[in-house]
Image (cartoon, grey):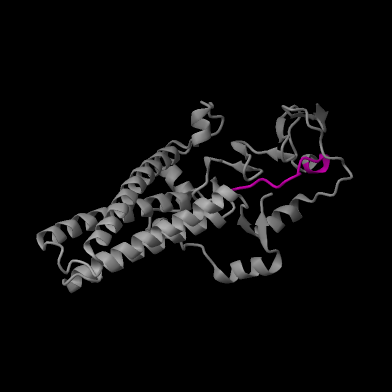
Amino acid sequence: MQSSGHRFRDIEHHPLLAENDSYDSSSSEADMAERVWFIRDGCGMVCAIMTWLLVVYADFVVTFVMLLPSKDFWYSVINGVLFNCLAVLALSSHLRTMLTDPGAVPKGNATKEYMDNLQLKPGEVIYKCPKCCSIKPERAHHCSICKRCIRKMDHHCPWVNNCVGEKNQRFFVLFTMYIALISAHALILCGFQFFSCVRGQWTECSDFSPPVTVILMIFLCLEGFLFLTFTAVMFGTQIHSICNDETEIERLKSEKPTWERRLRWEGMKSVFGGQPSLLWINPFAGFRIRRLLLRAKKGGPEFSV
């Protein structure tokens, strides 16, 4: 298909939006920036709620079953503060991943007017997504759950009810890291607690009865082991992808890179921003409560449906 001196490639031959269709790319992108991102997916919302409940359960067992009954004051204080701080960081990273636009391409921008504004060279090929009627930038892929094309889409994760893409990959990496840390911490505390209870013949090792204590701790051990294994693997694969400047979709499809790769530290700096610092592991960096309230007041949440 020829248009304005360049070729427009549409795999499914979906027609372009009509020229008289009202679409303003600048206003659309500005409108997206003024909205809170949230995906209304039943499975994703259930998984996100389960994630929070499991972290709250772990915090309950660690605090009320293991630490508060302990006779060692400093042992309880240090481990309690450390575990709860890691839990807050994990849940904050989860929220930032879930509520951050992963890099969605504006819907319906495949108009003749918009393509003319791109100032493309003659013969240059551009691609249109037939599902959301948007021009696909390089390395963008369509997500059937978000119903949008996502820039540098790595995968859609139901546990964070969102895609992991160009703009929220950093928060997803932090989420997997902090979940892995609190899981390892919980397993270590369970080991010490079991040893202490067996040595004291289960007397005064917990405010709960021995059977209840055993059940709560066994479930926490299973949860900690599963979450540690899963998040540690995900953290490793994400770091590997960032250092190789290759998303999971690109790796699975064996796509040959047509872009200039930013390897190792250059890739890390492009995702986490700037030189290495404590801001890299801070999920609150760049967060503005006033801006969030203004967005909610102006446009409300953006639901991808």
Say which residue appears at 76% left-offset and 44% top-offset: 108
Q: What predominant SS class does the magenta segment belong to?
A: loop
Q: Residue furthest right?
A: 20
Quarter of the image that includes the N terminus = top right
Relative to 196, say whether 173 is above or below: above
Q: How many marks?
A: 0
In the rendered image, residue 110 lying in the magenta stretch gets the answer: yes
Residue 265: x percent and y percent? Answer: 40, 44
Q: Residue furthest left?
A: 199
Residue 86: x percent and y percent? Answer: 35, 61
Q: Is residue 102 visible?
A: no
Q: Which residues are magenta?
A: 102-114
Relative to 93, say whether 127 is above or below: above
Whether residue 183 sits left or right of residue 201 in the image: it is right
Residue 201: x percent and y percent? Answer: 11, 61
Q: Is residue 20 visible?
A: yes
Say which residue appears at 46% left-offset and 61% top-offset: 92
When asked about the image quadrant of residue 31, the answer is bottom right
144, 170: nearer the viewer: 144
Residue 38: x percent and y percent? Answer: 61, 55
Say which residue appears at 37% left-offset and 53% top-offset: 179
In the rendered image, residue 193 lying in the magenta stretch gets the answer: no
40, 164: nearer the viewer: 40
